[in-house]
Image (cartoon, helix red, strand yellow):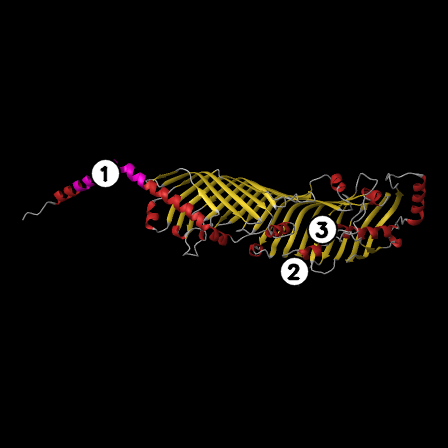
Amino acid sequence: MKRPSWKRLVLISLAVLVTTVACGFGVYGLFSDRINKNIHDAIVEYIQSRVKSGAESLSSGKLSIELGDINYTFFSGSLDVHRVRVGYHDSTEARGRNVSVDIPLISVSGLYPWDILNGGGLSLGTIMIDHPTIAHQAWGQAIDSLDLDAHDTSSMQLPRMPDVDSLMRQIFVDLVPSYVQPLTIGGIRVSDVDFKNSDDNPAALYRGRIHDLSLRVGAITVDASKPGVRPIESVEVSVASWLREYTDKRSIHTRGLHVLVSDKDSSLVVDSIDLRLPLEYTYSATAIRFSYRTRELSIGTFALGPSQKDDDYFAAQKFNSDRFRVKGGAVLLREIDFKALQARTALHVQTIDVGTLELDILSNKRLRSNPKAAPQKMLNQLAQSLPFQLAVDSLVVKGTSIHYGERWSHSATPATLSWKGVSATATGLRNITDQGAPFTITARGRFQDQATMEATFVIPLTSPTYVLDARGSLGRTDVTSLNTFLPIAENVRIRSGIASSASFDYKVRGRACTGKVSPHFTNLYIDLVNKESKKTGGIFNVFVSFVANWLAIKNDNDGEDYKDGVIKYTLPADAAFMQTIWFPVRSGLTKAAGM
């Protein structure tokens, strides 16, 4: 029998293959519209039924989803869902809330029916959502948890830093229905989200708005059977503006917020943030940069102080009070213990470097002290009142200026003292009871733009009572520079006087101050000023000044006639921290001068 030629077999096979393909294309050409329509209808029906029924069952009827036109292309695996509306309604007898989400278009790539038909999970490409709007409205009586939150926001608390992996697993793994697991998504892109929060209850905690929010989510893998797999590769969130307004007139406005969470690093960037408090104080900061990988936090500039002018601020006060303004820049925190910070149990930082710092304190003396007010808290009390452990190894400030003032009656100009070009180092900033060295501040700068002053202050922050040990020195000074302060605060003007050197050494225990001031000065003469005009002159003041310079004032405190100015002083009940530093020195100086 003759064997068939292999060439003939190949030709026959090719002919059969070509015929089959041609028949397939012919059949598809005749029935392609029907095939595509059947696949399209099956996908649409599956999405409509699954989404609606799944939403209702998982939320116990509180969540509803409406889908507009659904376009699905089989060959490209692309799905477009138009006019998506999500509603959430939850109410109790006391309180309720509505959440509405409107999405013009959701685009999905890489969606093929085989995963759904085989029941082996779902795999998608990229999900695109553009210009969604979200509105949250609440009504009824505020629940207790809001009251607790309001209390938390008014006290010194560490920021809430949730466990990102745990949070992602809760959101994506626990909430994704099991019938679409394992779920794989190439990425999610959400752009230009606008979120508005409101509450009809006048006692509500806050209302706010988020404008221009964008979300970028990397590859997603959701599989409850693999608890060790991180569900999200990366998350990136950007917000142009985020405003929260509280009913007690507080507000927080954040601009340019950018958050990145990935395997390589977790970072936070904020262009600016402003926090207004009920007493018209404002906290603000710019150029905030935070990195989990480097364990560093940097701040470009920061400021604290009333938003009002001084006259308006003090006009609203019924009693004497102090006004603080603080500005600074180029702040860097290194080696932050983020595990303790995440647990909200401790703030541990190895070093804090501050490039510039401006401290402006103005104390009002025109009114009377509040008889019912508690004494101002000292540093040890403030440190011990923190609901977390504080530990900073070192704090270095390179360029500091301090401006201290007192407002007195009959004077539009405050009595002022100033320090410029101050470099300061603080160590042992801890509220933990241990064997470490106490909180110590060393500083060096120019006093009244006259002479170099050096000082060291030791303040044990764990002491039950306020303890301060202070010592320092001052170089050659023309004491007439004190006329920015004495005429207004003490009704005395220095006519002449030179201090060749001075030093101080004193202790504060509670409100009792003991120690000495050692000023070496010559040719000291004073003039009394009118208590109302704060000017020299008048027969009586001239006569008293003459007698004082002749009999009371020690014109020269040097050589054999030198004597220390003994400090034996009791601080006023309303004395603040800066006054515990200045008042004892002032007491010793006046005694040394015989005033």
The secondary structure that most of the magenta stretch takes on is: helix
Q: Is residue 377 magenta?
A: no
Residue 400 bears which disc, if any? none
Residue placed at 82% from the left, 54% from the top? 517
The answer to which of marks 2 and 1 sits earlier in the sequence is 1
Do the residues bearing badges 2 and 3 touch, measured as CB atoms within 8 Å? no
Say left or right for 298 vs 107.
Answer: right
Q: Circle 1: is it few (<14), some (14-19), or many (20+) Cα within 10 Å?
A: few
Residue 297 position within the rendered picture, expressed as x and y whole percent measured from the top left: 58, 49
Sequence-wise first label, 1 or 3:
1
- Mark 2 to mark 1 CA distance (whole Å): 82 Å
Identity, as a three-letter code, of the amino acid under mark 1: Val
Above or below, 305 relative to 585: above
- Horizontal arrangement in the rendering, residue 9 relative to residue 55 (left or right): left
Q: Quadrant of residue 314?
A: top right
Q: Are marks 1 and 3 in contact (CB under 8 Å)?
A: no
Q: Is 24 within the magenta? A: yes
The reply to whether dot 2 and dot 1 touch (C-beta < 8 Å) is no
Return the x and y of residue 213 as percentages of the image width and height: 52, 41
Q: Which residue is mark 3?
A: 443
Q: Earlier in the sequence, mark 2 or mark 3?
A: 2
354 and 196: which one is in front?
A: 196
Q: Residue at x 72, y 57 (%)?
A: 459
From the viewer's side, name the closer residue of 171 and 365: 171
The residue wearing badge 2 is 432
Quick check: 475 above or below 129? below
